[in-house]
Image: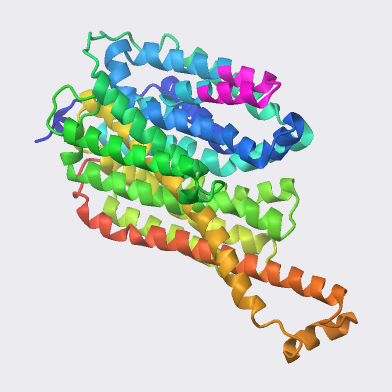
Amino acid sequence: MTAAATAPATSPVRWTIILAVVLTAVLEVLDSTIVNVALPHMQAAFGITNDQTVWILTSYIVASVVVMPLTGFFVRRLGRRRLITTAILGFMAFSALCGLSWSIEIIVICRIGQGLFGAFLIPLSQSILFDSFPRERRGQAMALFGLGVVVAPVLGPTLGAILTEYFSWRAVFYVNLPIAAFALIMISGELKKEEVKSIKVDWTGLVLMVGAIAALQLMLDLGETRDWFASHLIQIAAITAVLCGVAFTVRGVGKRDNIIDFSLLRDRSFAGANVAIMGFGIAMFGSIAILPLFVQGLLGYPVLESGYLFIPRGIAAGFSMVFTGAVLVNRVDQRLLVAIGLILTGTGNVMMGWLDLTAGFWDLAWPGAVSGLGMGLFFVPMSTLAFQDIGQDRQDEASGIYGVTRSIGSSIGIAIVGWQVARRMQFHWAALSAGITPFNPAVHAYLAPLGLDPQSAAGAVRLAAQVQAQASMLAFQDAFWLTGIAAFAMLPVVLILQRPPKVAGPGH
């Protein structure tokens, strides 16, 4: 029998802590997407280029991903209570400084600070929730956690659009302050003090791990804007990621005091869940990342209306998570729920791949709602399955690994779909342009009602614009199909997961 199976249930459930840690989870993930819609306003305010604007996003993500797997280490050194209160206070301080920033250099430094402190919020929230619920109610815990981790980034662009439209881009940072303050007030005094341990730091392992993750994240975030391996920076990042990653893995396997406990990955369900959450990150965040580009850049939607498109997806995801956690997770094989969630997520993304330039609001919103239903069905049981055999003494470290895997998966998804759109746009442009000749009857049939001739300057401009629009549409269709396939490709991983032990539901 495993440690997790023999651990006593921790009752009663303290809802004050639960609300506090869910709010802290919301803070971290919300900040990764809410800023996106405000970037054009920041670009205008600071007078910077697109390449410089990318650093506002990249600095936060890189700092967060680098520190997240160290959660277990810092919990042993500082204790949960001290670590989470320090993380919330640090996140608040750097959020305020981001809103006060007057240059690109200052805001990038402050975003790094946000990422360093915010990195601990997700894994700590997850492990605290696990300890607050007995085993038979962990599905409810993950439903609450999922409302913060999955629904918040979905609705982030909507909230960001509203704040930017009616207030200022600075408001997307200031909104963190009341949420963080409320969470801090509730959590102070609720978490008991823990004994801290004096742990020897494996500095070599720490440097190798930080180098590998930071280089990989940097490559994923800047690859598209730097034309990937045509850039010396991306080449150096790739080489650094591989060398540090291999050295860290070879050196750390079997090492008892390694900065990351690799023995956690011997657990079949935990290892499989990490693979699945990475693939799901590609499917979910890849489609979410390109949707604003698609509807604003190609279909001409205003910023606010494009933000509203995420509301049906968020509502569907929230309903799905609550229903799955409260009703389904203890009544249906959780592996089946994960499979259905992947199918619905993939189907919603593929539905986006069937759209064309005439797509209306609900044509765009319904596929998002289908994907949202899939999010809840996937996330709640997958998180429960991942930690079913992880003992309480290792949950903080496992949560850190699981969180960084999810983050890297989302970064891979964003990088892949961005590259796919750019590459396929060139391909479709070349293919469509080849058929545009003065001898093609279809060209004359298209221009004649407009009173234009194919050989006139006005006719050439009109044709070029139409070819560009169609090539872009086809490229976005390909990208949405790719994110759908990424979800379907994770279905075989379900077979790796162990069947969860049967537990009595609430009231039994």
* Residue 8 percent location from the top left of the image: 19, 25
Magenta part, dominant SS: helix
Q: Nearer the viewer, residue 250 or 227?
A: 227
Q: Quadrant of the C terminus?
A: top left
Give the residue at x 61% y 49%. Answer: 310
The verdict on residue 99 being magenta is yes
When asked about the image quadrant of residue 476, the answer is bottom right
* Residue 286 percent location from the top left of the image: 50, 52
* Residue 505 percent location from the top left of the image: 27, 40
Give the residue at x 83% y 82%. Answer: 455
Give the residue at x 46% y 59%. Answer: 483
* Residue 191 percent location from the top left of the image: 37, 13
When asked about the image quadrant of residue 436, the answer is bottom right
Does 324 sit left or right of 467 as displayed? left
Inspect this view and state whether residue 166 appears: yes
Question: Where does the magenta region start and end?
Answer: 94-112
